[in-house]
Structures are given as structure tokens and as C-alpha cells.
């Protein structure tokens, strides 16, 4: 019902439907996650953070273990989340990070971003650039530069990574490096 209201662009009804469903199924992490998403979309990051933290507390948290490992072969392995649950939890953590950033909790958002990246085998450039931006706001320019360098290892000509690297270099007091990054970015996109 909530998704129907979302599709019909009726956010207030979707919020009420999600809240009503949670009265019936208070232990559903998926309903909490949906409500957090709706609250975030409605511009209420504080409520979204609260609800997302509840959803994360209720969500399956066991990591997938390689087949044949002690965890996978244990009796509790039946409780391991399936890939759909893991995808949902990763999406929920991204929503949590987004709302942390919206309220200016940069240090906590940075820790969450680092934890998210640690669980990814090959992070996307957008994930690395998100980490770099967050690290800059958290006054951790060295960490931001490291994330930018990782992004540039994936795509040495990525304009946003080059531009962000220039900003980080300036923050680190390295104007020559900043100029080099900007020059490379301009070469990639002469219309800048």
C-alpha cells in the first residue's frame, strides 16, 4: 500500500500507511526502512535517522561467509541473510549515511561510509567520491585524498575525482598539486 501511494505521488498518505503498518508489524526492518526513506524524502532527516537506526537494529546483520567456513557450516547459518536482505541493508545504510550528512554529523557519516566500503569487494567511483567529500567535511583531508586516489586508479580521467582531488590538495596546502589536478580535469572537459 505504501509503495502504491509513493507511485501515485502521495507522500503524506504513504507516510501514514507505513506508520500504520508498523503498528501491526513493529518488528519489520523492511517497514522501518521504508518509513525512513519516506521521511528522508519528506525532508525530515532527524526522523529518518531515528527510523533508519531502528531498521538497522532489526535487520539481519550476519555477513555472508564463504561456503565451507565455520560460520556457513554452523547451525546458525540458516539465520544468515539472503542476498536480497544484504542489498536492502546496504541500501538502508546508504540512506542512514545520507541523513547523517544532511544533519551535519560528518564524523559519524565518515565512519559509516568506511564501514560500507569495507564490505564492498570493488567500490564504485561514486562510493569513493562520497567518502572523499564526507572526509573533507569531517576535516580529514588526508583520508579524502586517499579516496580520490583510489577513484583515480579506477578511472584516471574522471572529472569529478580530478576536481575533488584539486580541492583536497588545496586543503592540504599543496597548490601545485591542485593546479595539476585542475589542468587534468580541464584537459578532459575543455568546456569547463
Image (tube, helix red, strand yellow):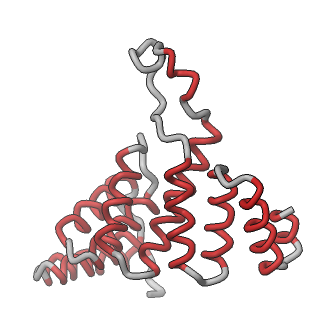
| Residue farthest toward the left in the current orientation of the protein | 173
Query: In this picture, is 122 found above or below 48?
Result: above
Q: Give percent across and percent down for residue 92.
A: 56, 57
Relative to 45, 30 lies left or right: right
The residue at the point 29 percent across, 80 percent down is: 182
Q: Give percent across and percent down for residue 50.
A: 51, 69
Relative to 131, 93 lies left or right: right
Q: Give percent across and percent down for residue 128.
A: 38, 60
How many tags in the picture? 0
Quarter location, residue 69:
top left
Q: Give percent across and percent down for residue 176.
A: 13, 80
In depth, the one of 68 and 62 nearer the eye is: 62
Quarter location, residue 120:
top left
Relative to 12, 133 lies left or right: left
The residue at the point 61 percent across, 84 percent down is: 43
The quarter of the image holding the N terminus is: bottom right
Amino acid at each position: 500500500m505504501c509503495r502504491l501511494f509513493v507511485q501515485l505521488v502521495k507522500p503524506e498518505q504513504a507516510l501514514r500507511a507505513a506508520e500504520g503498518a508498523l503498528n501491526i508489524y513493529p518488528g519489520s526492518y523492511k517497514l522501518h526502512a521504508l518509513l525512513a526513506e519516506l521521511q528522508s524524502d519528506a525532508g525530515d532527516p532527524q526522523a529518518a535517522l531515528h527510523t533508519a537506526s531502528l531498521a538497522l537494529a532489526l535487520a539481519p546483520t550476519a555477513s555472508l561467509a564463504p561456503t565451507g567456513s565455520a560460520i556457513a557450516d554452523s547451525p546458525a547459518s540458516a539465520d544468515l541473510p539472503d542476498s536480497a536482505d544484504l542489498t536492502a541493508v546496504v541500501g538502508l545504510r546508504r540512506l542512514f549515511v545520507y541523513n547523517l550528512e544532511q544533519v551535519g554529523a560528518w564524523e559519524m557519516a565518515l565512519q559509516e561510509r568506511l564501514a560500507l566500503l569495507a564490505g564492498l569487494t570493488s567500490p564504485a567511483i561514486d562510493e569513493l567520491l562520497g567518502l572523499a567529500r564526507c572526509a573533507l567535511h569531517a576535516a580529514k583531508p588526508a583520508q579524502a585524498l586517499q579516496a580520490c586516489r583510489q577513484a583515480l586508479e579506477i578511472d584516471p580521467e574522471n572529472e569529478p575525482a580530478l576536481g575533488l582531488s584539486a580541492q583536497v590538495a588545496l586543503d592540504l596546502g599543496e597548490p601545485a598539486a591542485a593546479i595539476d589536478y585542475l589542468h587534468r580535469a580541464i584537459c578532459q572537459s575543455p568546456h569547463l
